[in-house]
Amino acid sequence: MPPIDDHLAIFDPVTDPDQAERYLTDWPRDAKGRARAILRPRTVEEVAQIVRLCAAAAIPVVPQGGHTGLVAGGVPSADGTEVVVSLERLNHIREIDPANFSMTVEAGCILANLHAVASEHERLFPLALGAQGSCQIGGNVATNAGGLNVLRYGMTRNLVLGIEAVLPDGQIWNGLRKLHKNNTGYDLKQLLIGSEGTLGIITAVSLRLFPKPTQVETAFLAVENPAAAVALYGLARRDLSDLLSAFELIGHVGVELAQEATPDLRHPLETRSSHYVLMEASASGLVDLSALMQRFLESAMEAGHVLDGTVAANSAQAGALWRIREDLVEGQARRGRHLRTDVSVPISDIAAFLAKTDAALAQAEPNAIPVAYGHVGDGNLHYNVLPPPHMAEGDKPAFLKRCEQVVYAALPEFAGSISAEHGIGRAKLGSYLKGLAPEEKALTEGVKRLFDPKGIMSPGRLFEV
Ligand SMILES: Cc1cc2nc3c(=O)[nH]c(=O)nc-3n(C[C@H](O)[C@H](O)[C@H](O)COP(=O)(O)OP(=O)(O)OC[C@H]3O[C@@H](n4cnc5c(N)ncnc54)[C@H](O)[C@@H]3O)c2cc1C
């Protein structure tokens, strides 16, 4: 064994093949890799020592959080040269400061646990996504995750006050400020947010908190089409005094997929439509949110934006409505390999984008089953595609690639993006590089060279090897 591997062996590597399995793939299981070593450091200093050793020997390093990423960024390469650094043991809450509306936590903390800690202190950490029981805050920051509450609270980028990271030469950068305003020079933490492991390993973050909502109103509404959903969104922003916290569009296929995954999941409405909206408003303090919601629904019905609807009477009913949105993701996974996209267009172009893409896909691949849903308030759509039921496994990759090209081809007309929230990783590298303007490419490469001149951090993600 060469000396470098002896050195790395002191960081408690995972050697049991069964245990190693989960570090070699991620949630979609579309890609699988091999690793030179899988290490689980317990302290920031240990992370720094690992990176210093790897930098000295020019060994590539890939950080890992909760393995829920959807673009194969955390999956080690197939050639087995990369050292995996799992952050799962760096999972301490360093400080919670309710008066400052902030908390400082280590990268390996599971997102759902942070919700619970904030809640104990009458605060809200608003980042919410289907994977919150497994994903880690370090992974969320590294991917600049979006999720369900972006329209009110912004992306992860808007929720981070400070960062501590191990840089690609093994230095520890302590940028863990918890200031809400700090205008001194370049905001370097923003470069690490969304860098997908290519500029360093995030080891801790200071996060922005909000008052814990004491009133929540959740409604499931049938709408005639996506244009009606967009009109309804505008009305909701106005009538709910900007207390809207989520506004999801779900097609009827999405509801069916959720019921396929969870057979006891009841359709909440008598009326059947091609599209539904799942929306939530929340408030703390003295506002009468229930009355606001009632008035909004009355004006939405009067304006003809809503065909039918139901408002959850309690948190159990609200949970059942949210399960439709959560379980439709599982329903797609159960159908096997499929196309997942997370495109964005201006909110005002959602209906036109969907109409154009539906028509183009029906013409190019008549057997494709589109499953479009998403975060209307962010213009972010998951225009996914399932292959027809009896397609041979071997034919699926080429088929799904063709479908992806159809979806992406509709974007330039709307100046849209191929990734609203999941990032680029390895899965979208080709399409990302194709759309990068020369001046953007030069600046991006310059940033990478500045942070990581040896190119050891997550090679092949965001940049070609
Ligand atoms: C069911 C489901 C629903 C989802 N819903 C959403 C959604 O609504 N919105 C959304 O934005 N995303 C969503 N995602 C994808 C989302 O990107 C991830 O869930 C999450 O942000 C990744 O966190 P993770 O800890 O699992 O990271 P991983 O999957 O482990 O890693 C993701 C990337 O970050 C890097 N990384 C991880 N930790 C660190 C670190 N500490 N320092 C530096 N780099 C690091 C990895 O190298 C990799 O490139 C969903 C995923 C699933 C499975």
Image (cartoon, helix red, strand yellow):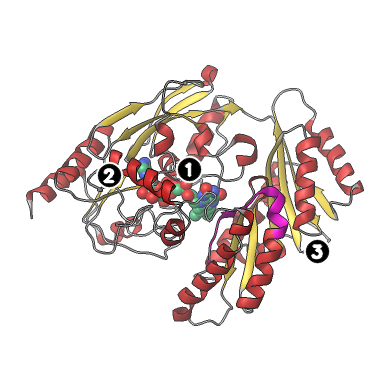
Q: Which disc is residue 144 wearing?
A: 1
Residue at (29, 39) in percent of width and height? 450
Q: Indicate if the residue with disc 1 has its beta carbon within 8 Å of ligand 1.
A: yes
Q: Quarter of the image holding residue 460?
A: bottom left
Q: CA distance from mark 3 to mark 2?
A: 50 Å
Q: Amino acid at mark 1?
A: Asn
Seen in the picture, residue 252 relative to 444 is either above or below; the reply is below
Tell me: 439 left or right of 450: right
Classify 10 Å Cα crowding around label 1: few (below 14), some (14-19), many (20 and above): many
Which residue is under mark 2?
40
Q: Is mark 3 within 8 Å of ligand 1?
A: no
Query: For this rendering, which residue is in front, 438 or 458?
Result: 438
For residue 326, which quarter of the picture? bottom right
Of the numbered discs 1 and 2, the one sitting upstream in the chain is 2
Marks 1 and 3, Cα distance to the nearest angstrom? Answer: 36 Å
- Judging from the image, what secondary structure is the residue with disc 3 in? loop
Which of the numbered marks, if any, corresponds to residue 272?
3
Residue lying farthest front?
439
Q: CA distance from mark 1 to mark 2?
A: 23 Å
Q: Is residue 317 visible?
A: yes
Mark nearer the N terminus (1 vs 3): 1
